[in-house]
Image: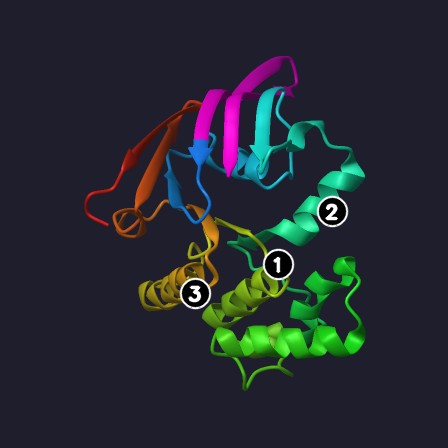
Amino acid sequence: MYELRSVTKRYTRGKDTVTALDGVDLTIADGDRLVIQGPTGGGKSTLLQMLGGLDRPTSGEVVLDGTDMARLSEGKLTAVRSATIGFVFQSFNLIPTLTAQENVETALVPLGAKAKERRERAAEALRSVGLGERLGHLPSEMSGGQQQRVAIARALVKQPKVLLADEPTGNLDESMRDEIMEVLERMWKELGLTFIMVTHDSAIAKKAPRLATIRKGRITVKENAGA
């Protein structure tokens, strides 16, 4: 479970101070699916970075399973990210010179998995997202939707507890968007993940069980009756 308590994040830009998050309180239970929406610059991605331990708050607590990530050393925080949290981004972030299987294997290297185990788990993860025939393909040999499936497989191959997705359909057309969302929702259900997603797409937001709206660093959360 996540507990965010009075989380504030301020950035200094030249002589100005920008408040990206302003006293955010948020509880996310194990197995939740939460979609975060809001205007550009409202704090969506900053909030996701806090949840993923990619950035630290200026003040407040970001507690995951009883541990305040804001107080962990960099080494321990990296270990939490490597073992517990999977990330999917809009830009895929695949290594262009590696095959699909090799890209997925990179997520297992920090966990100390042996080469044979990495290969087997990566192949299985790619099969689970419908890419069993694409193990040896480079990113340039795949469509945008296929590349995002590789990125999802890479996020899930380490069997994380949490999946964080930042505009994962932002670079895809409508049909590809629907395919990727089907994969993400299926993985959420099958694996019992806590799934938190930032999106500007209202069609996706309407289907989420919980919807968080963030504006000027302040957040409101509601149960989504239409989901």
Percent coordinates x, y for residue 155 in the rendering: 58, 60
- The residues tagged by marks 2 and 1 sit, at their Cα atoms, a distance apart of 20 Å
Q: Residue at x 59, y 61 (%)?
A: 159
Q: Which residues are magenta?
A: 1-26
Q: Depth check: 41 or 193 in front?
A: 193
| Rendering coords of residue 203 (x, y %) | 26, 52
- Camera-nearest residue between 66 and 138: 66
Instruction: Name the one closer to the observer, 212 or 95.
Output: 212
What type is the residue that disc 2 sits on?
Ala
Q: Say which residue label 1 marks.
A: 93
Question: Percent x, y for residue 118?
Answer: 72, 73
Q: Which mark is residue 190?
A: 3
Q: How far, Cα to Cα, is label 3 from label 2?
A: 25 Å
In which quarter of the view is residue 169 placed? bottom left
Q: Secondary structure at mark 2?
A: helix
The reply to whether residue 100 is in sight is no
Q: Earlier in the sequence, mark 1 or mark 3?
A: 1
Instruction: Identify residue for label 2.
Output: 79
Relative height, residue 214 to residue 107 (above, below): above
Q: Is residue 35 visible?
A: yes
